[in-house]
């Protein structure tokens, strides 16, 4: 694990695997850090370069004052990948991470050869809805919201078990300014037009029990990106890589194989 000082923000990241190998980059959801992907890492094919990072205001990255713009979040990871010399990666983004993926692909196709858009959409919620959440975070803190967030994130079976506790703590320990800042970025984002112009391999993943980005919303991406493949993970909510890591990794690995990203040289 390492950090990169970009001047306006310090990004915490992990870069593992051979430096000349095909790269897979992972971007997290709102209120999580890059441990979101821990369960699927052992299930990935050998020989990949795997890059994970904490977006600004999350995990061990620095927390500039809120609000943030989606442009700033995209520019952060753009600068990270440029600094690491990454080209032609497969970019895996979940929720807001999937919005970052859409924006980065529209801006820098030299960085991305394919996208995996998980539990995300071209537009998530309404500006008014996000403004209400931001106001609640600022007035009451994330502990007041964590139970409701768990309901949106996870299936009933998962929420009733002990495995939900670390994720609830992760939300509650996210800096309020980081959560509010990223929420503001989501509120101001609409990628329908730019995502409809994308021409690259895409895997779209949804969870059948997702209360944040329901499957019908996620599936709209299939109609926007020609040739996109859709996978529904049953029994999983907003974070299928946590609830159903084997299923998630299975879809991801098949996609990497289909596009020739496993065992290929850049």
Image: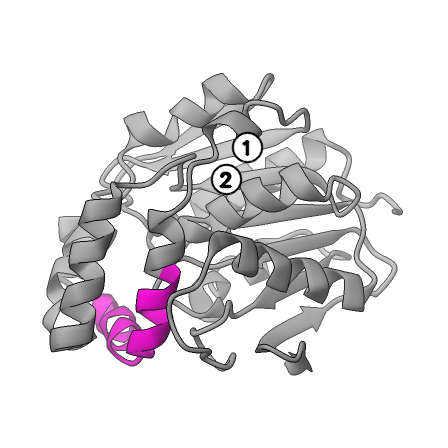
Expressed as whole percent of the image width and height from the top left, the position of residue 28 reads 46, 59
Look at the image and tell me whether residue 244 can be seen: no
Are there few (<14), some (14-19), or many (20+) residues within 10 Å of tag 2?
Answer: many
Q: Main secondary structure of the magenta part?
A: helix
Residue 127 on image: x %, y %: 26, 45
Image quarter (top left, top right, bottom left or bottom right) of the N terminus: bottom right
Q: Splitting the image into 4 quarters, where does residue 263 fall?
A: top right
Q: Which mark is residue 203?
A: 1
* Residue 174 shown in magenta: yes
Direction from residue 21 to residue 208 in the image, left or right = left
Judged from the image, the secondary structure of the residue bearing numbered disc 2 is strand
> What is the distance, in whole Å, between disc 2 and disc 1 at their CAs?
6 Å
Do we see residue 3 in this rendering?
Answer: yes
Residue 125: name its quadrant: top left
Q: Residue at horizontal 83%, vertical 62%?
A: 85
Q: Nearer the viewer, residue 59 or 185?
A: 185
Please report the bounds of the magenta region as a residue range: 162-182
């Amino acid at each position: 694990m390492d950090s990169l000082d970009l001047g306006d923000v310090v990004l915490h990241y992990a870069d593992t695997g051979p430096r000349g190998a095909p790269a897979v980059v992972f971007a997290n959801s709102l209120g999580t850090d890059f441990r979101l992907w821990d369960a699927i890492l052992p299930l990935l094919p050998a020989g990949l370069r795997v890059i994970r990072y904490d977006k600004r205001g999350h995990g061990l990255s620095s927390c500039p004052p809120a609000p943030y713009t989606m442009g700033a979040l995209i520019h952060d990871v753009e600068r990270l990948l440029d600094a690491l010399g990454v080209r032609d990666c497969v970019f895996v983004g979940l929720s807001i991470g999937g919005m970052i993926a859409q924006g980065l692909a529209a801006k820098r196709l030299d960085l991305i050869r394919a996208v995996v858009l998980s539990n995300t959409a071209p537009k998530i919620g309404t500006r008014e809805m996000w403004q209400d959440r931001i106001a609640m975070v600022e007035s009451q803190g994330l502990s007041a919201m964590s139970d409701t967030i768990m309901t949106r994130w996870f299936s009933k079976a998962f929420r009733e078990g002990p495995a939900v506790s670390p994720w609830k703590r992760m939300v509650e320990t996210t800096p309020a300014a980081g959560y509010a800042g990223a929420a503001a970025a989501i509120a101001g984002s609409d990628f329908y037009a730019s995502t409809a112009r994308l021409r690259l391999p895409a895997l779209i993943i949804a969870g059948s029990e997702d209360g944040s980005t329901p499957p019908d919303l996620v599936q709209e991406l299939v109609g926007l990106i020609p040739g996109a493949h859709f996978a529904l993970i049953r029994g999983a909510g907003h974070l299928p890589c946590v609830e159903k890591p084997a299923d998630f990794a299975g879809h991801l690995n098949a996609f990497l194989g289909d596009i020739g990203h496993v065992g290929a040289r850049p």
